[in-house]
Image (tube, rainbow, N blue to C red):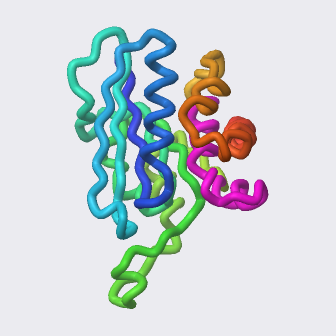
Amino acid sequence: MTKSILLVGVGGQGTILASKLLTIGLMQEGYDVKMSEIHGMSQRGGSVSSQIRYGEKIYSPVIEPGSADLIVSFEKMEALRWLEYLKKDGKVVVNNHEMMPMPVIMGVADYADDILDEIKKACKDVTVVNATKEAEKLGNGKVMNIILLGSLVKAMGLDDIDWTKIISENVKPNFVEANLKAFEVGKTLV
């Protein structure tokens, strides 16, 4: 059975690293995995997405609207923006975090207060985590992406993969310990 996961966020949140680690873990588990990433204006705080499809044999990484089993969003507005890609019975894991886009910063648009309510209206299975706050508690806001990866792994039941080894081999040595702690915290949030 093929599974499709969409990771979405804003440039600088570590969406690509989390996608890379997930892809490595799925490959080590024996799945055929295809990943595609879209950076857009990521260096300027723009939208970033990674599409990951895995199963016995995968021919394309592209996730069509209405076909994602899971959306993991690093920012609330991005979850809402990508909801059309979710399957009818899909699941959303969303970081309860706001990053103001340029139109909001410039005062020409508003950041809606009811984003989580809108997501919950559109999807029955929504898990809201406070990964950004948990990362701050750990003393390093940059590990928020690994907290979300831990939540994703728990939500998907992929605990048997050696994530400690994967993180240790793919994160800069100075940040391994912080990322391993963040991963464990993430697993407790789902």
Residue with the most extreme bottom position: 107
Q: Residue at x 50, y 56 (%)?
A: 13
Identified at 35% across, 21% down, the residue is 33
Please report the residue visible at 24 percent of the width from the left and 33 percent of the height from the top.
62
Give the image location of residue 92, x and y in percent.
49, 43
Q: Quadrant of residue 32?
A: top left
Picture quadrant where residue 95 is located: bottom right
Image-based side of 13 in relation to 48, left or right:
right
Say if 75 sits above or below 94 in the image.
below
Residue at 76% in and 59% down: 139
Q: Which quarter of the picture shows residue 19?
A: top left
* 189 relative position to 76: left or right: right
**Res 155 seen here:** no
**Residue 67 image offset from top left, x and y in percent:** 30, 33
**Position of residue 185 measured from the top left corner of the image (x, y, whole percent):** 74, 42
Q: Main secondary structure of the magenta part?
A: helix
Query: Can see residue 169?
Result: yes
On the rendered image, what quadrant is the C terminus found in? top right
Quadrant for the N terminus in the image: top left
Q: Closest to the observer: 188 or 17?
A: 17
Residue range (magenta): 131-155
Q: Is residue 74 magenta?
A: no
Q: How many marks?
A: 0
Nearer to us in this view, 47 or 140: 140
Q: Position of residue 16 (x, y in %)?
A: 42, 45
Lateral position of residue 34 relative to residue 91, left or right? left
